[in-house]
Image: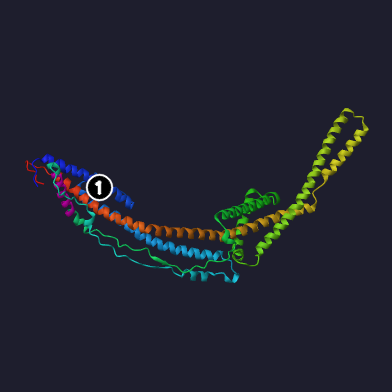
């Protein structure tokens, strides 16, 4: 095609180049947004990078295809995990007889019940790439303005050349075979009709039990520390060492009593000895503290009476200082002094002293047993909360993949269309740049 003025031809090519660049920018943005991929600067690249740009398009689609394939594996894992967690959870929270409890070897048999999946594939629709290329179409009615008609012919020629150039790349494009999400075949889970107390544990209650157990161990340690300092007359270091003893004792008792208390929590069973001892010791502690409270309340009243007598004695001694010949006042002072001395000379009864030591010891034992039981409850109930949380997480992950799977495939199909359009536009831009690189020496500008 010949045109006499190279400058006008160059201006026409530059106009096509700018229009094509704008389209590349808009469609490129849609392409990378569709795939959620890192975008590429599609405006400032030059023709020598043609292969690199197209390779970047293919890489973005390949990464998205891998994400879809990986989501299938994630879906299978989530379904399996959700099934096993729910099954183990129901086994823990179901109210059973002691004879119905699952032993560790039987628990392994449960894990052998595999969840399997039915695979199904859909044949991909083979749509020619040409339908995605919106090639320029000539108007049946020529325009009376020669520059416009020239631009139309020029645009079609460049379009045809770009289409031929892009064929080489489009032939090698790979399309992912569309597959349905595998259908999960899950064995039926027995949902218990009656639940044990573990079913009602939540994260908040676990936190409360943890705080209670922690406070119990701290109080037990303080009791032993004060006993070491004030009763056994030990130094601070030895008292601190003794104070750590309850933690070791609780850990050892957990190993000894764990099975019995776990059985009690999960079944209708006899009350464990640890529970009965704890209740008995708690009752004795409360009774002892009640007796000590009554004694100290009475003692407090006597102390208040003694203070009032001492006050009266002080007043009478002041009056005697002003009238030292008053024999009646002297007799009253002597009588008050004698009564105060008798009250001050009274010692704490040996029974009360003994009861104080017994109450302190029983209180320490009570705290020790409570810490033991709370720790075992924490371990068992914590497992229930853990299983419930992850069962819900895996179920929700599987549901999310089911919900998003068809959307991902639609995005991939849209990306295939956008890739073909982008390759055509990039080739068109490449040809425009090659034409603009020419330097005609005469008036006949051969395009």
Q: Read off the residue under disc 1.
A: 24
How many dots with numbers?
1
Decide: few, some or many residues near mark 1? Use Cα within 10 Å; few <14, some 14-19, many ≥20.
many
Depth check: 133 or 300 in front? 133
Residue 21 image-quadrant placement: top left
Depth check: 239 or 186 in front? 186
Vertical relation: 61 (above or below) 301 = below
Residue 267 x/y as whole percent: 60, 66
| Local SS, label 1 | helix
Q: Residue at x 57, y 69 (%)?
A: 101
Residue 209 x/y as whole percent: 59, 55
Range shown magenta = 149-164
Q: Is residue 259 visible?
A: no
Depth check: 195 or 154 in front? 154
Q: Residue at x 52, y 71 (%)?
A: 106
- Describe residue 409's horizontal placement relative to residue 360 as left or right: left
């Amino acid at each position: 095609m010949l045109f006499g003025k190279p400058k006008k031809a160059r201006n026409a090519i530059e106009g096509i180049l700018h229009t094509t660049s704008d389209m590349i920018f808009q469609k490129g943005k849609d392409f990378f947004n569709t795939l959620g991929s890192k975008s590429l600067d599609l405006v400032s690249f030059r023709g020598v990078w043609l292969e690199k740009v197209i390779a970047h398009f293919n890489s973005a689609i390949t990464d998205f295809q891998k994400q879809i394939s990986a989501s299938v594996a994630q879906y299978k894992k989530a379904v399996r995990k959700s099934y096993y967690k729910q099954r183990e959870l129901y086994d823990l929270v179901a109210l059973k007889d002691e004879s119905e409890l699952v032993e560790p070897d039987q628990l392994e048999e449960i894990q052998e019940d595999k969840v399997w999946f039915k695979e199904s594939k859909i044949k991909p629709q083979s749509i020619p790439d040409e339908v995605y290329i919106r090639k320029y179409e000539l108007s049946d009615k020529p325009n009376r303005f020669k520059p416009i008609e020239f631009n139309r012919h020029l645009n079609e020629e460049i379009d045809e050349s770009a289409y031929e150039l892009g064929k080489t790349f489009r032939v090698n494009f790979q399309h992912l075979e569309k597959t349905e999400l595998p259908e999960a075949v899950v064995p039926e889970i027995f949902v218990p009709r009656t639940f044990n107390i573990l079913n009602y544990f939540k994260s908040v209650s676990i936190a409360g039990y943890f705080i209670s157990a922690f406070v119990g161990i701290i109080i037990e340690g303080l009791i032993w520390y004060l006993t070491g300092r004030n009763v056994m007359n030990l130094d601070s270091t030895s008292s601190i060492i003794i104070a750590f003893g309850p933690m070791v004792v609780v850990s050892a008792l957990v190993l000894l009593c764990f099975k019995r208390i776990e059985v009690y929590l999960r079944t209708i069973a006899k009350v464990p000895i640890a529970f009965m001892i704890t209740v008995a010791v708690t009752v004795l502690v409360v009774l002892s503290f009640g007796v000590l409270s009554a004694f100290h309340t009475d003692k407090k009243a006597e102390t208040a009476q003694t203070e009032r007598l001492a006050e009266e004695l002080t007043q009478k001694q002041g009056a005697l200082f002003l009238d030292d010949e008053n024999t009646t006042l002297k007799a009253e002072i002597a009588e008050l002094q004698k009564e105060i001395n008798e009250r001050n000379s009274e010692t704490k009864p040996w029974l009360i002293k003994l009861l104080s030591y017994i109450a302190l010891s029983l209180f320490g034992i009570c705290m020790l047993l409570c810490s033991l039981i709370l720790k075992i409850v924490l371990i068992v109930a914590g497992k229930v909360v853990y299983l419930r949380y992850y069962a819900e997480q895996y179920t929700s992950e599987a549901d999310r993949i089911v919900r998003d799977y068809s959307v991902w495939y639609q995005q991939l199909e849209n990306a295939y269309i956008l890739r073909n359009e982008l390759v055509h536009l990039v080739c068109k831009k490449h040809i425009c740049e090659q034409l603009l690189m020419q330097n005609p020496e005469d008036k006949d500008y051969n395009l």
